[in-house]
Image (spheres, helix red, strand yellow):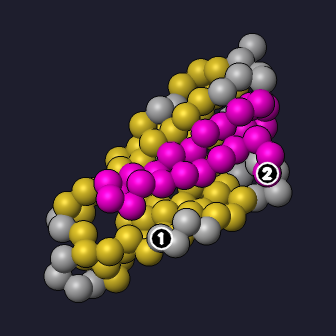
Amino acid sequence: QVQVVESGGGLVQPGGSLRLSCAASGSIFHVSGMHWYRQAPGKERELVASIRSDGGTNYADSVKGRFVISGDNAKNTMYLQMDSLKSEDTAVYFCNVDLITGWGSNESMWGQGTQVLVSS
């Protein structure tokens, strides 16, 4: 069994910072990519940032220069450092992990989400 768990959300004032964490655990053979998505009320889920197993990263235009994604392959863990937060960053943030399980199946696993609220 494989689990994906996010943490680190909360309430922050505009201009502030938060750091989200995501950890995948269980019977994992290989993680090929990890992604952060977010979904604001009344909006579709959108891709925020991705990191590949080779360290390559991608960002949505709306967060470039403000968010930094990083990962620890040995721990199957990913982080999202969010700086200069804006009210429009308010959303539930979801971790998504592309992996191969210990029994050889390709899976795309989702965490339960963590709420980020940017408000004064």
Q: Amino acid at mark 1?
A: Ser
Circle 1: element type = loop
Taking the magenta stretch, the answer to whether it contains residue 71 is yes
Q: Position of residue 50 (x, y in %)?
A: 60, 63
70 vs 98, nearest the viewer: 70
Direction from residue 71 to residue 118 in the image, left or right: right
User: What's drawn in magenta, residue-wise?
Assistant: 64-89
Residue 94 rendering spot, x and y as whole percentages:
51, 51
Q: Quadrant of the N terminus?
A: bottom left
State the residue at coordinates (78%, 37%).
Answer: 88
Residue at the limit of the structure toward the bottom, as seen here: 104
The x and y percentages for residue 40 are 67, 44
Quadrant of residue 11 in the image? top right
Q: CA distance from mark 2 to mark 1?
A: 20 Å
Is there any visible trace of residue 108 in the rendered image? no
Name the side, left or right, on which 76 lies relative to 102: right
Q: Image point 61% across, 68% down: which residue?
A: 56
* Mark 1: few/some/many CA within 10 Å (<14, 14-19, 20+): some
Residue 106 left/right relative to 63: left
Mark 1 — residue?
Answer: 53
Instruction: State which tag comes first along the sequence, 2 or 1.
Output: 1
- Whether residue 29 is visible here, answered yes or no, is yes
Q: Amino acid at mark 2?
A: Lys
Q: Identify the image quadrant of the C terminus.
A: top right
**In the rendered image, the vertical position of residue 50 relative to residue 115, given as above or below:** below
| Residue identified by numbered label 2 | 64
Q: Nearer the viewer, residue 1 or 44?
A: 1
| Residue 82 part of the magenta-drawn span | yes
SS category of the residue bearing label 2: loop
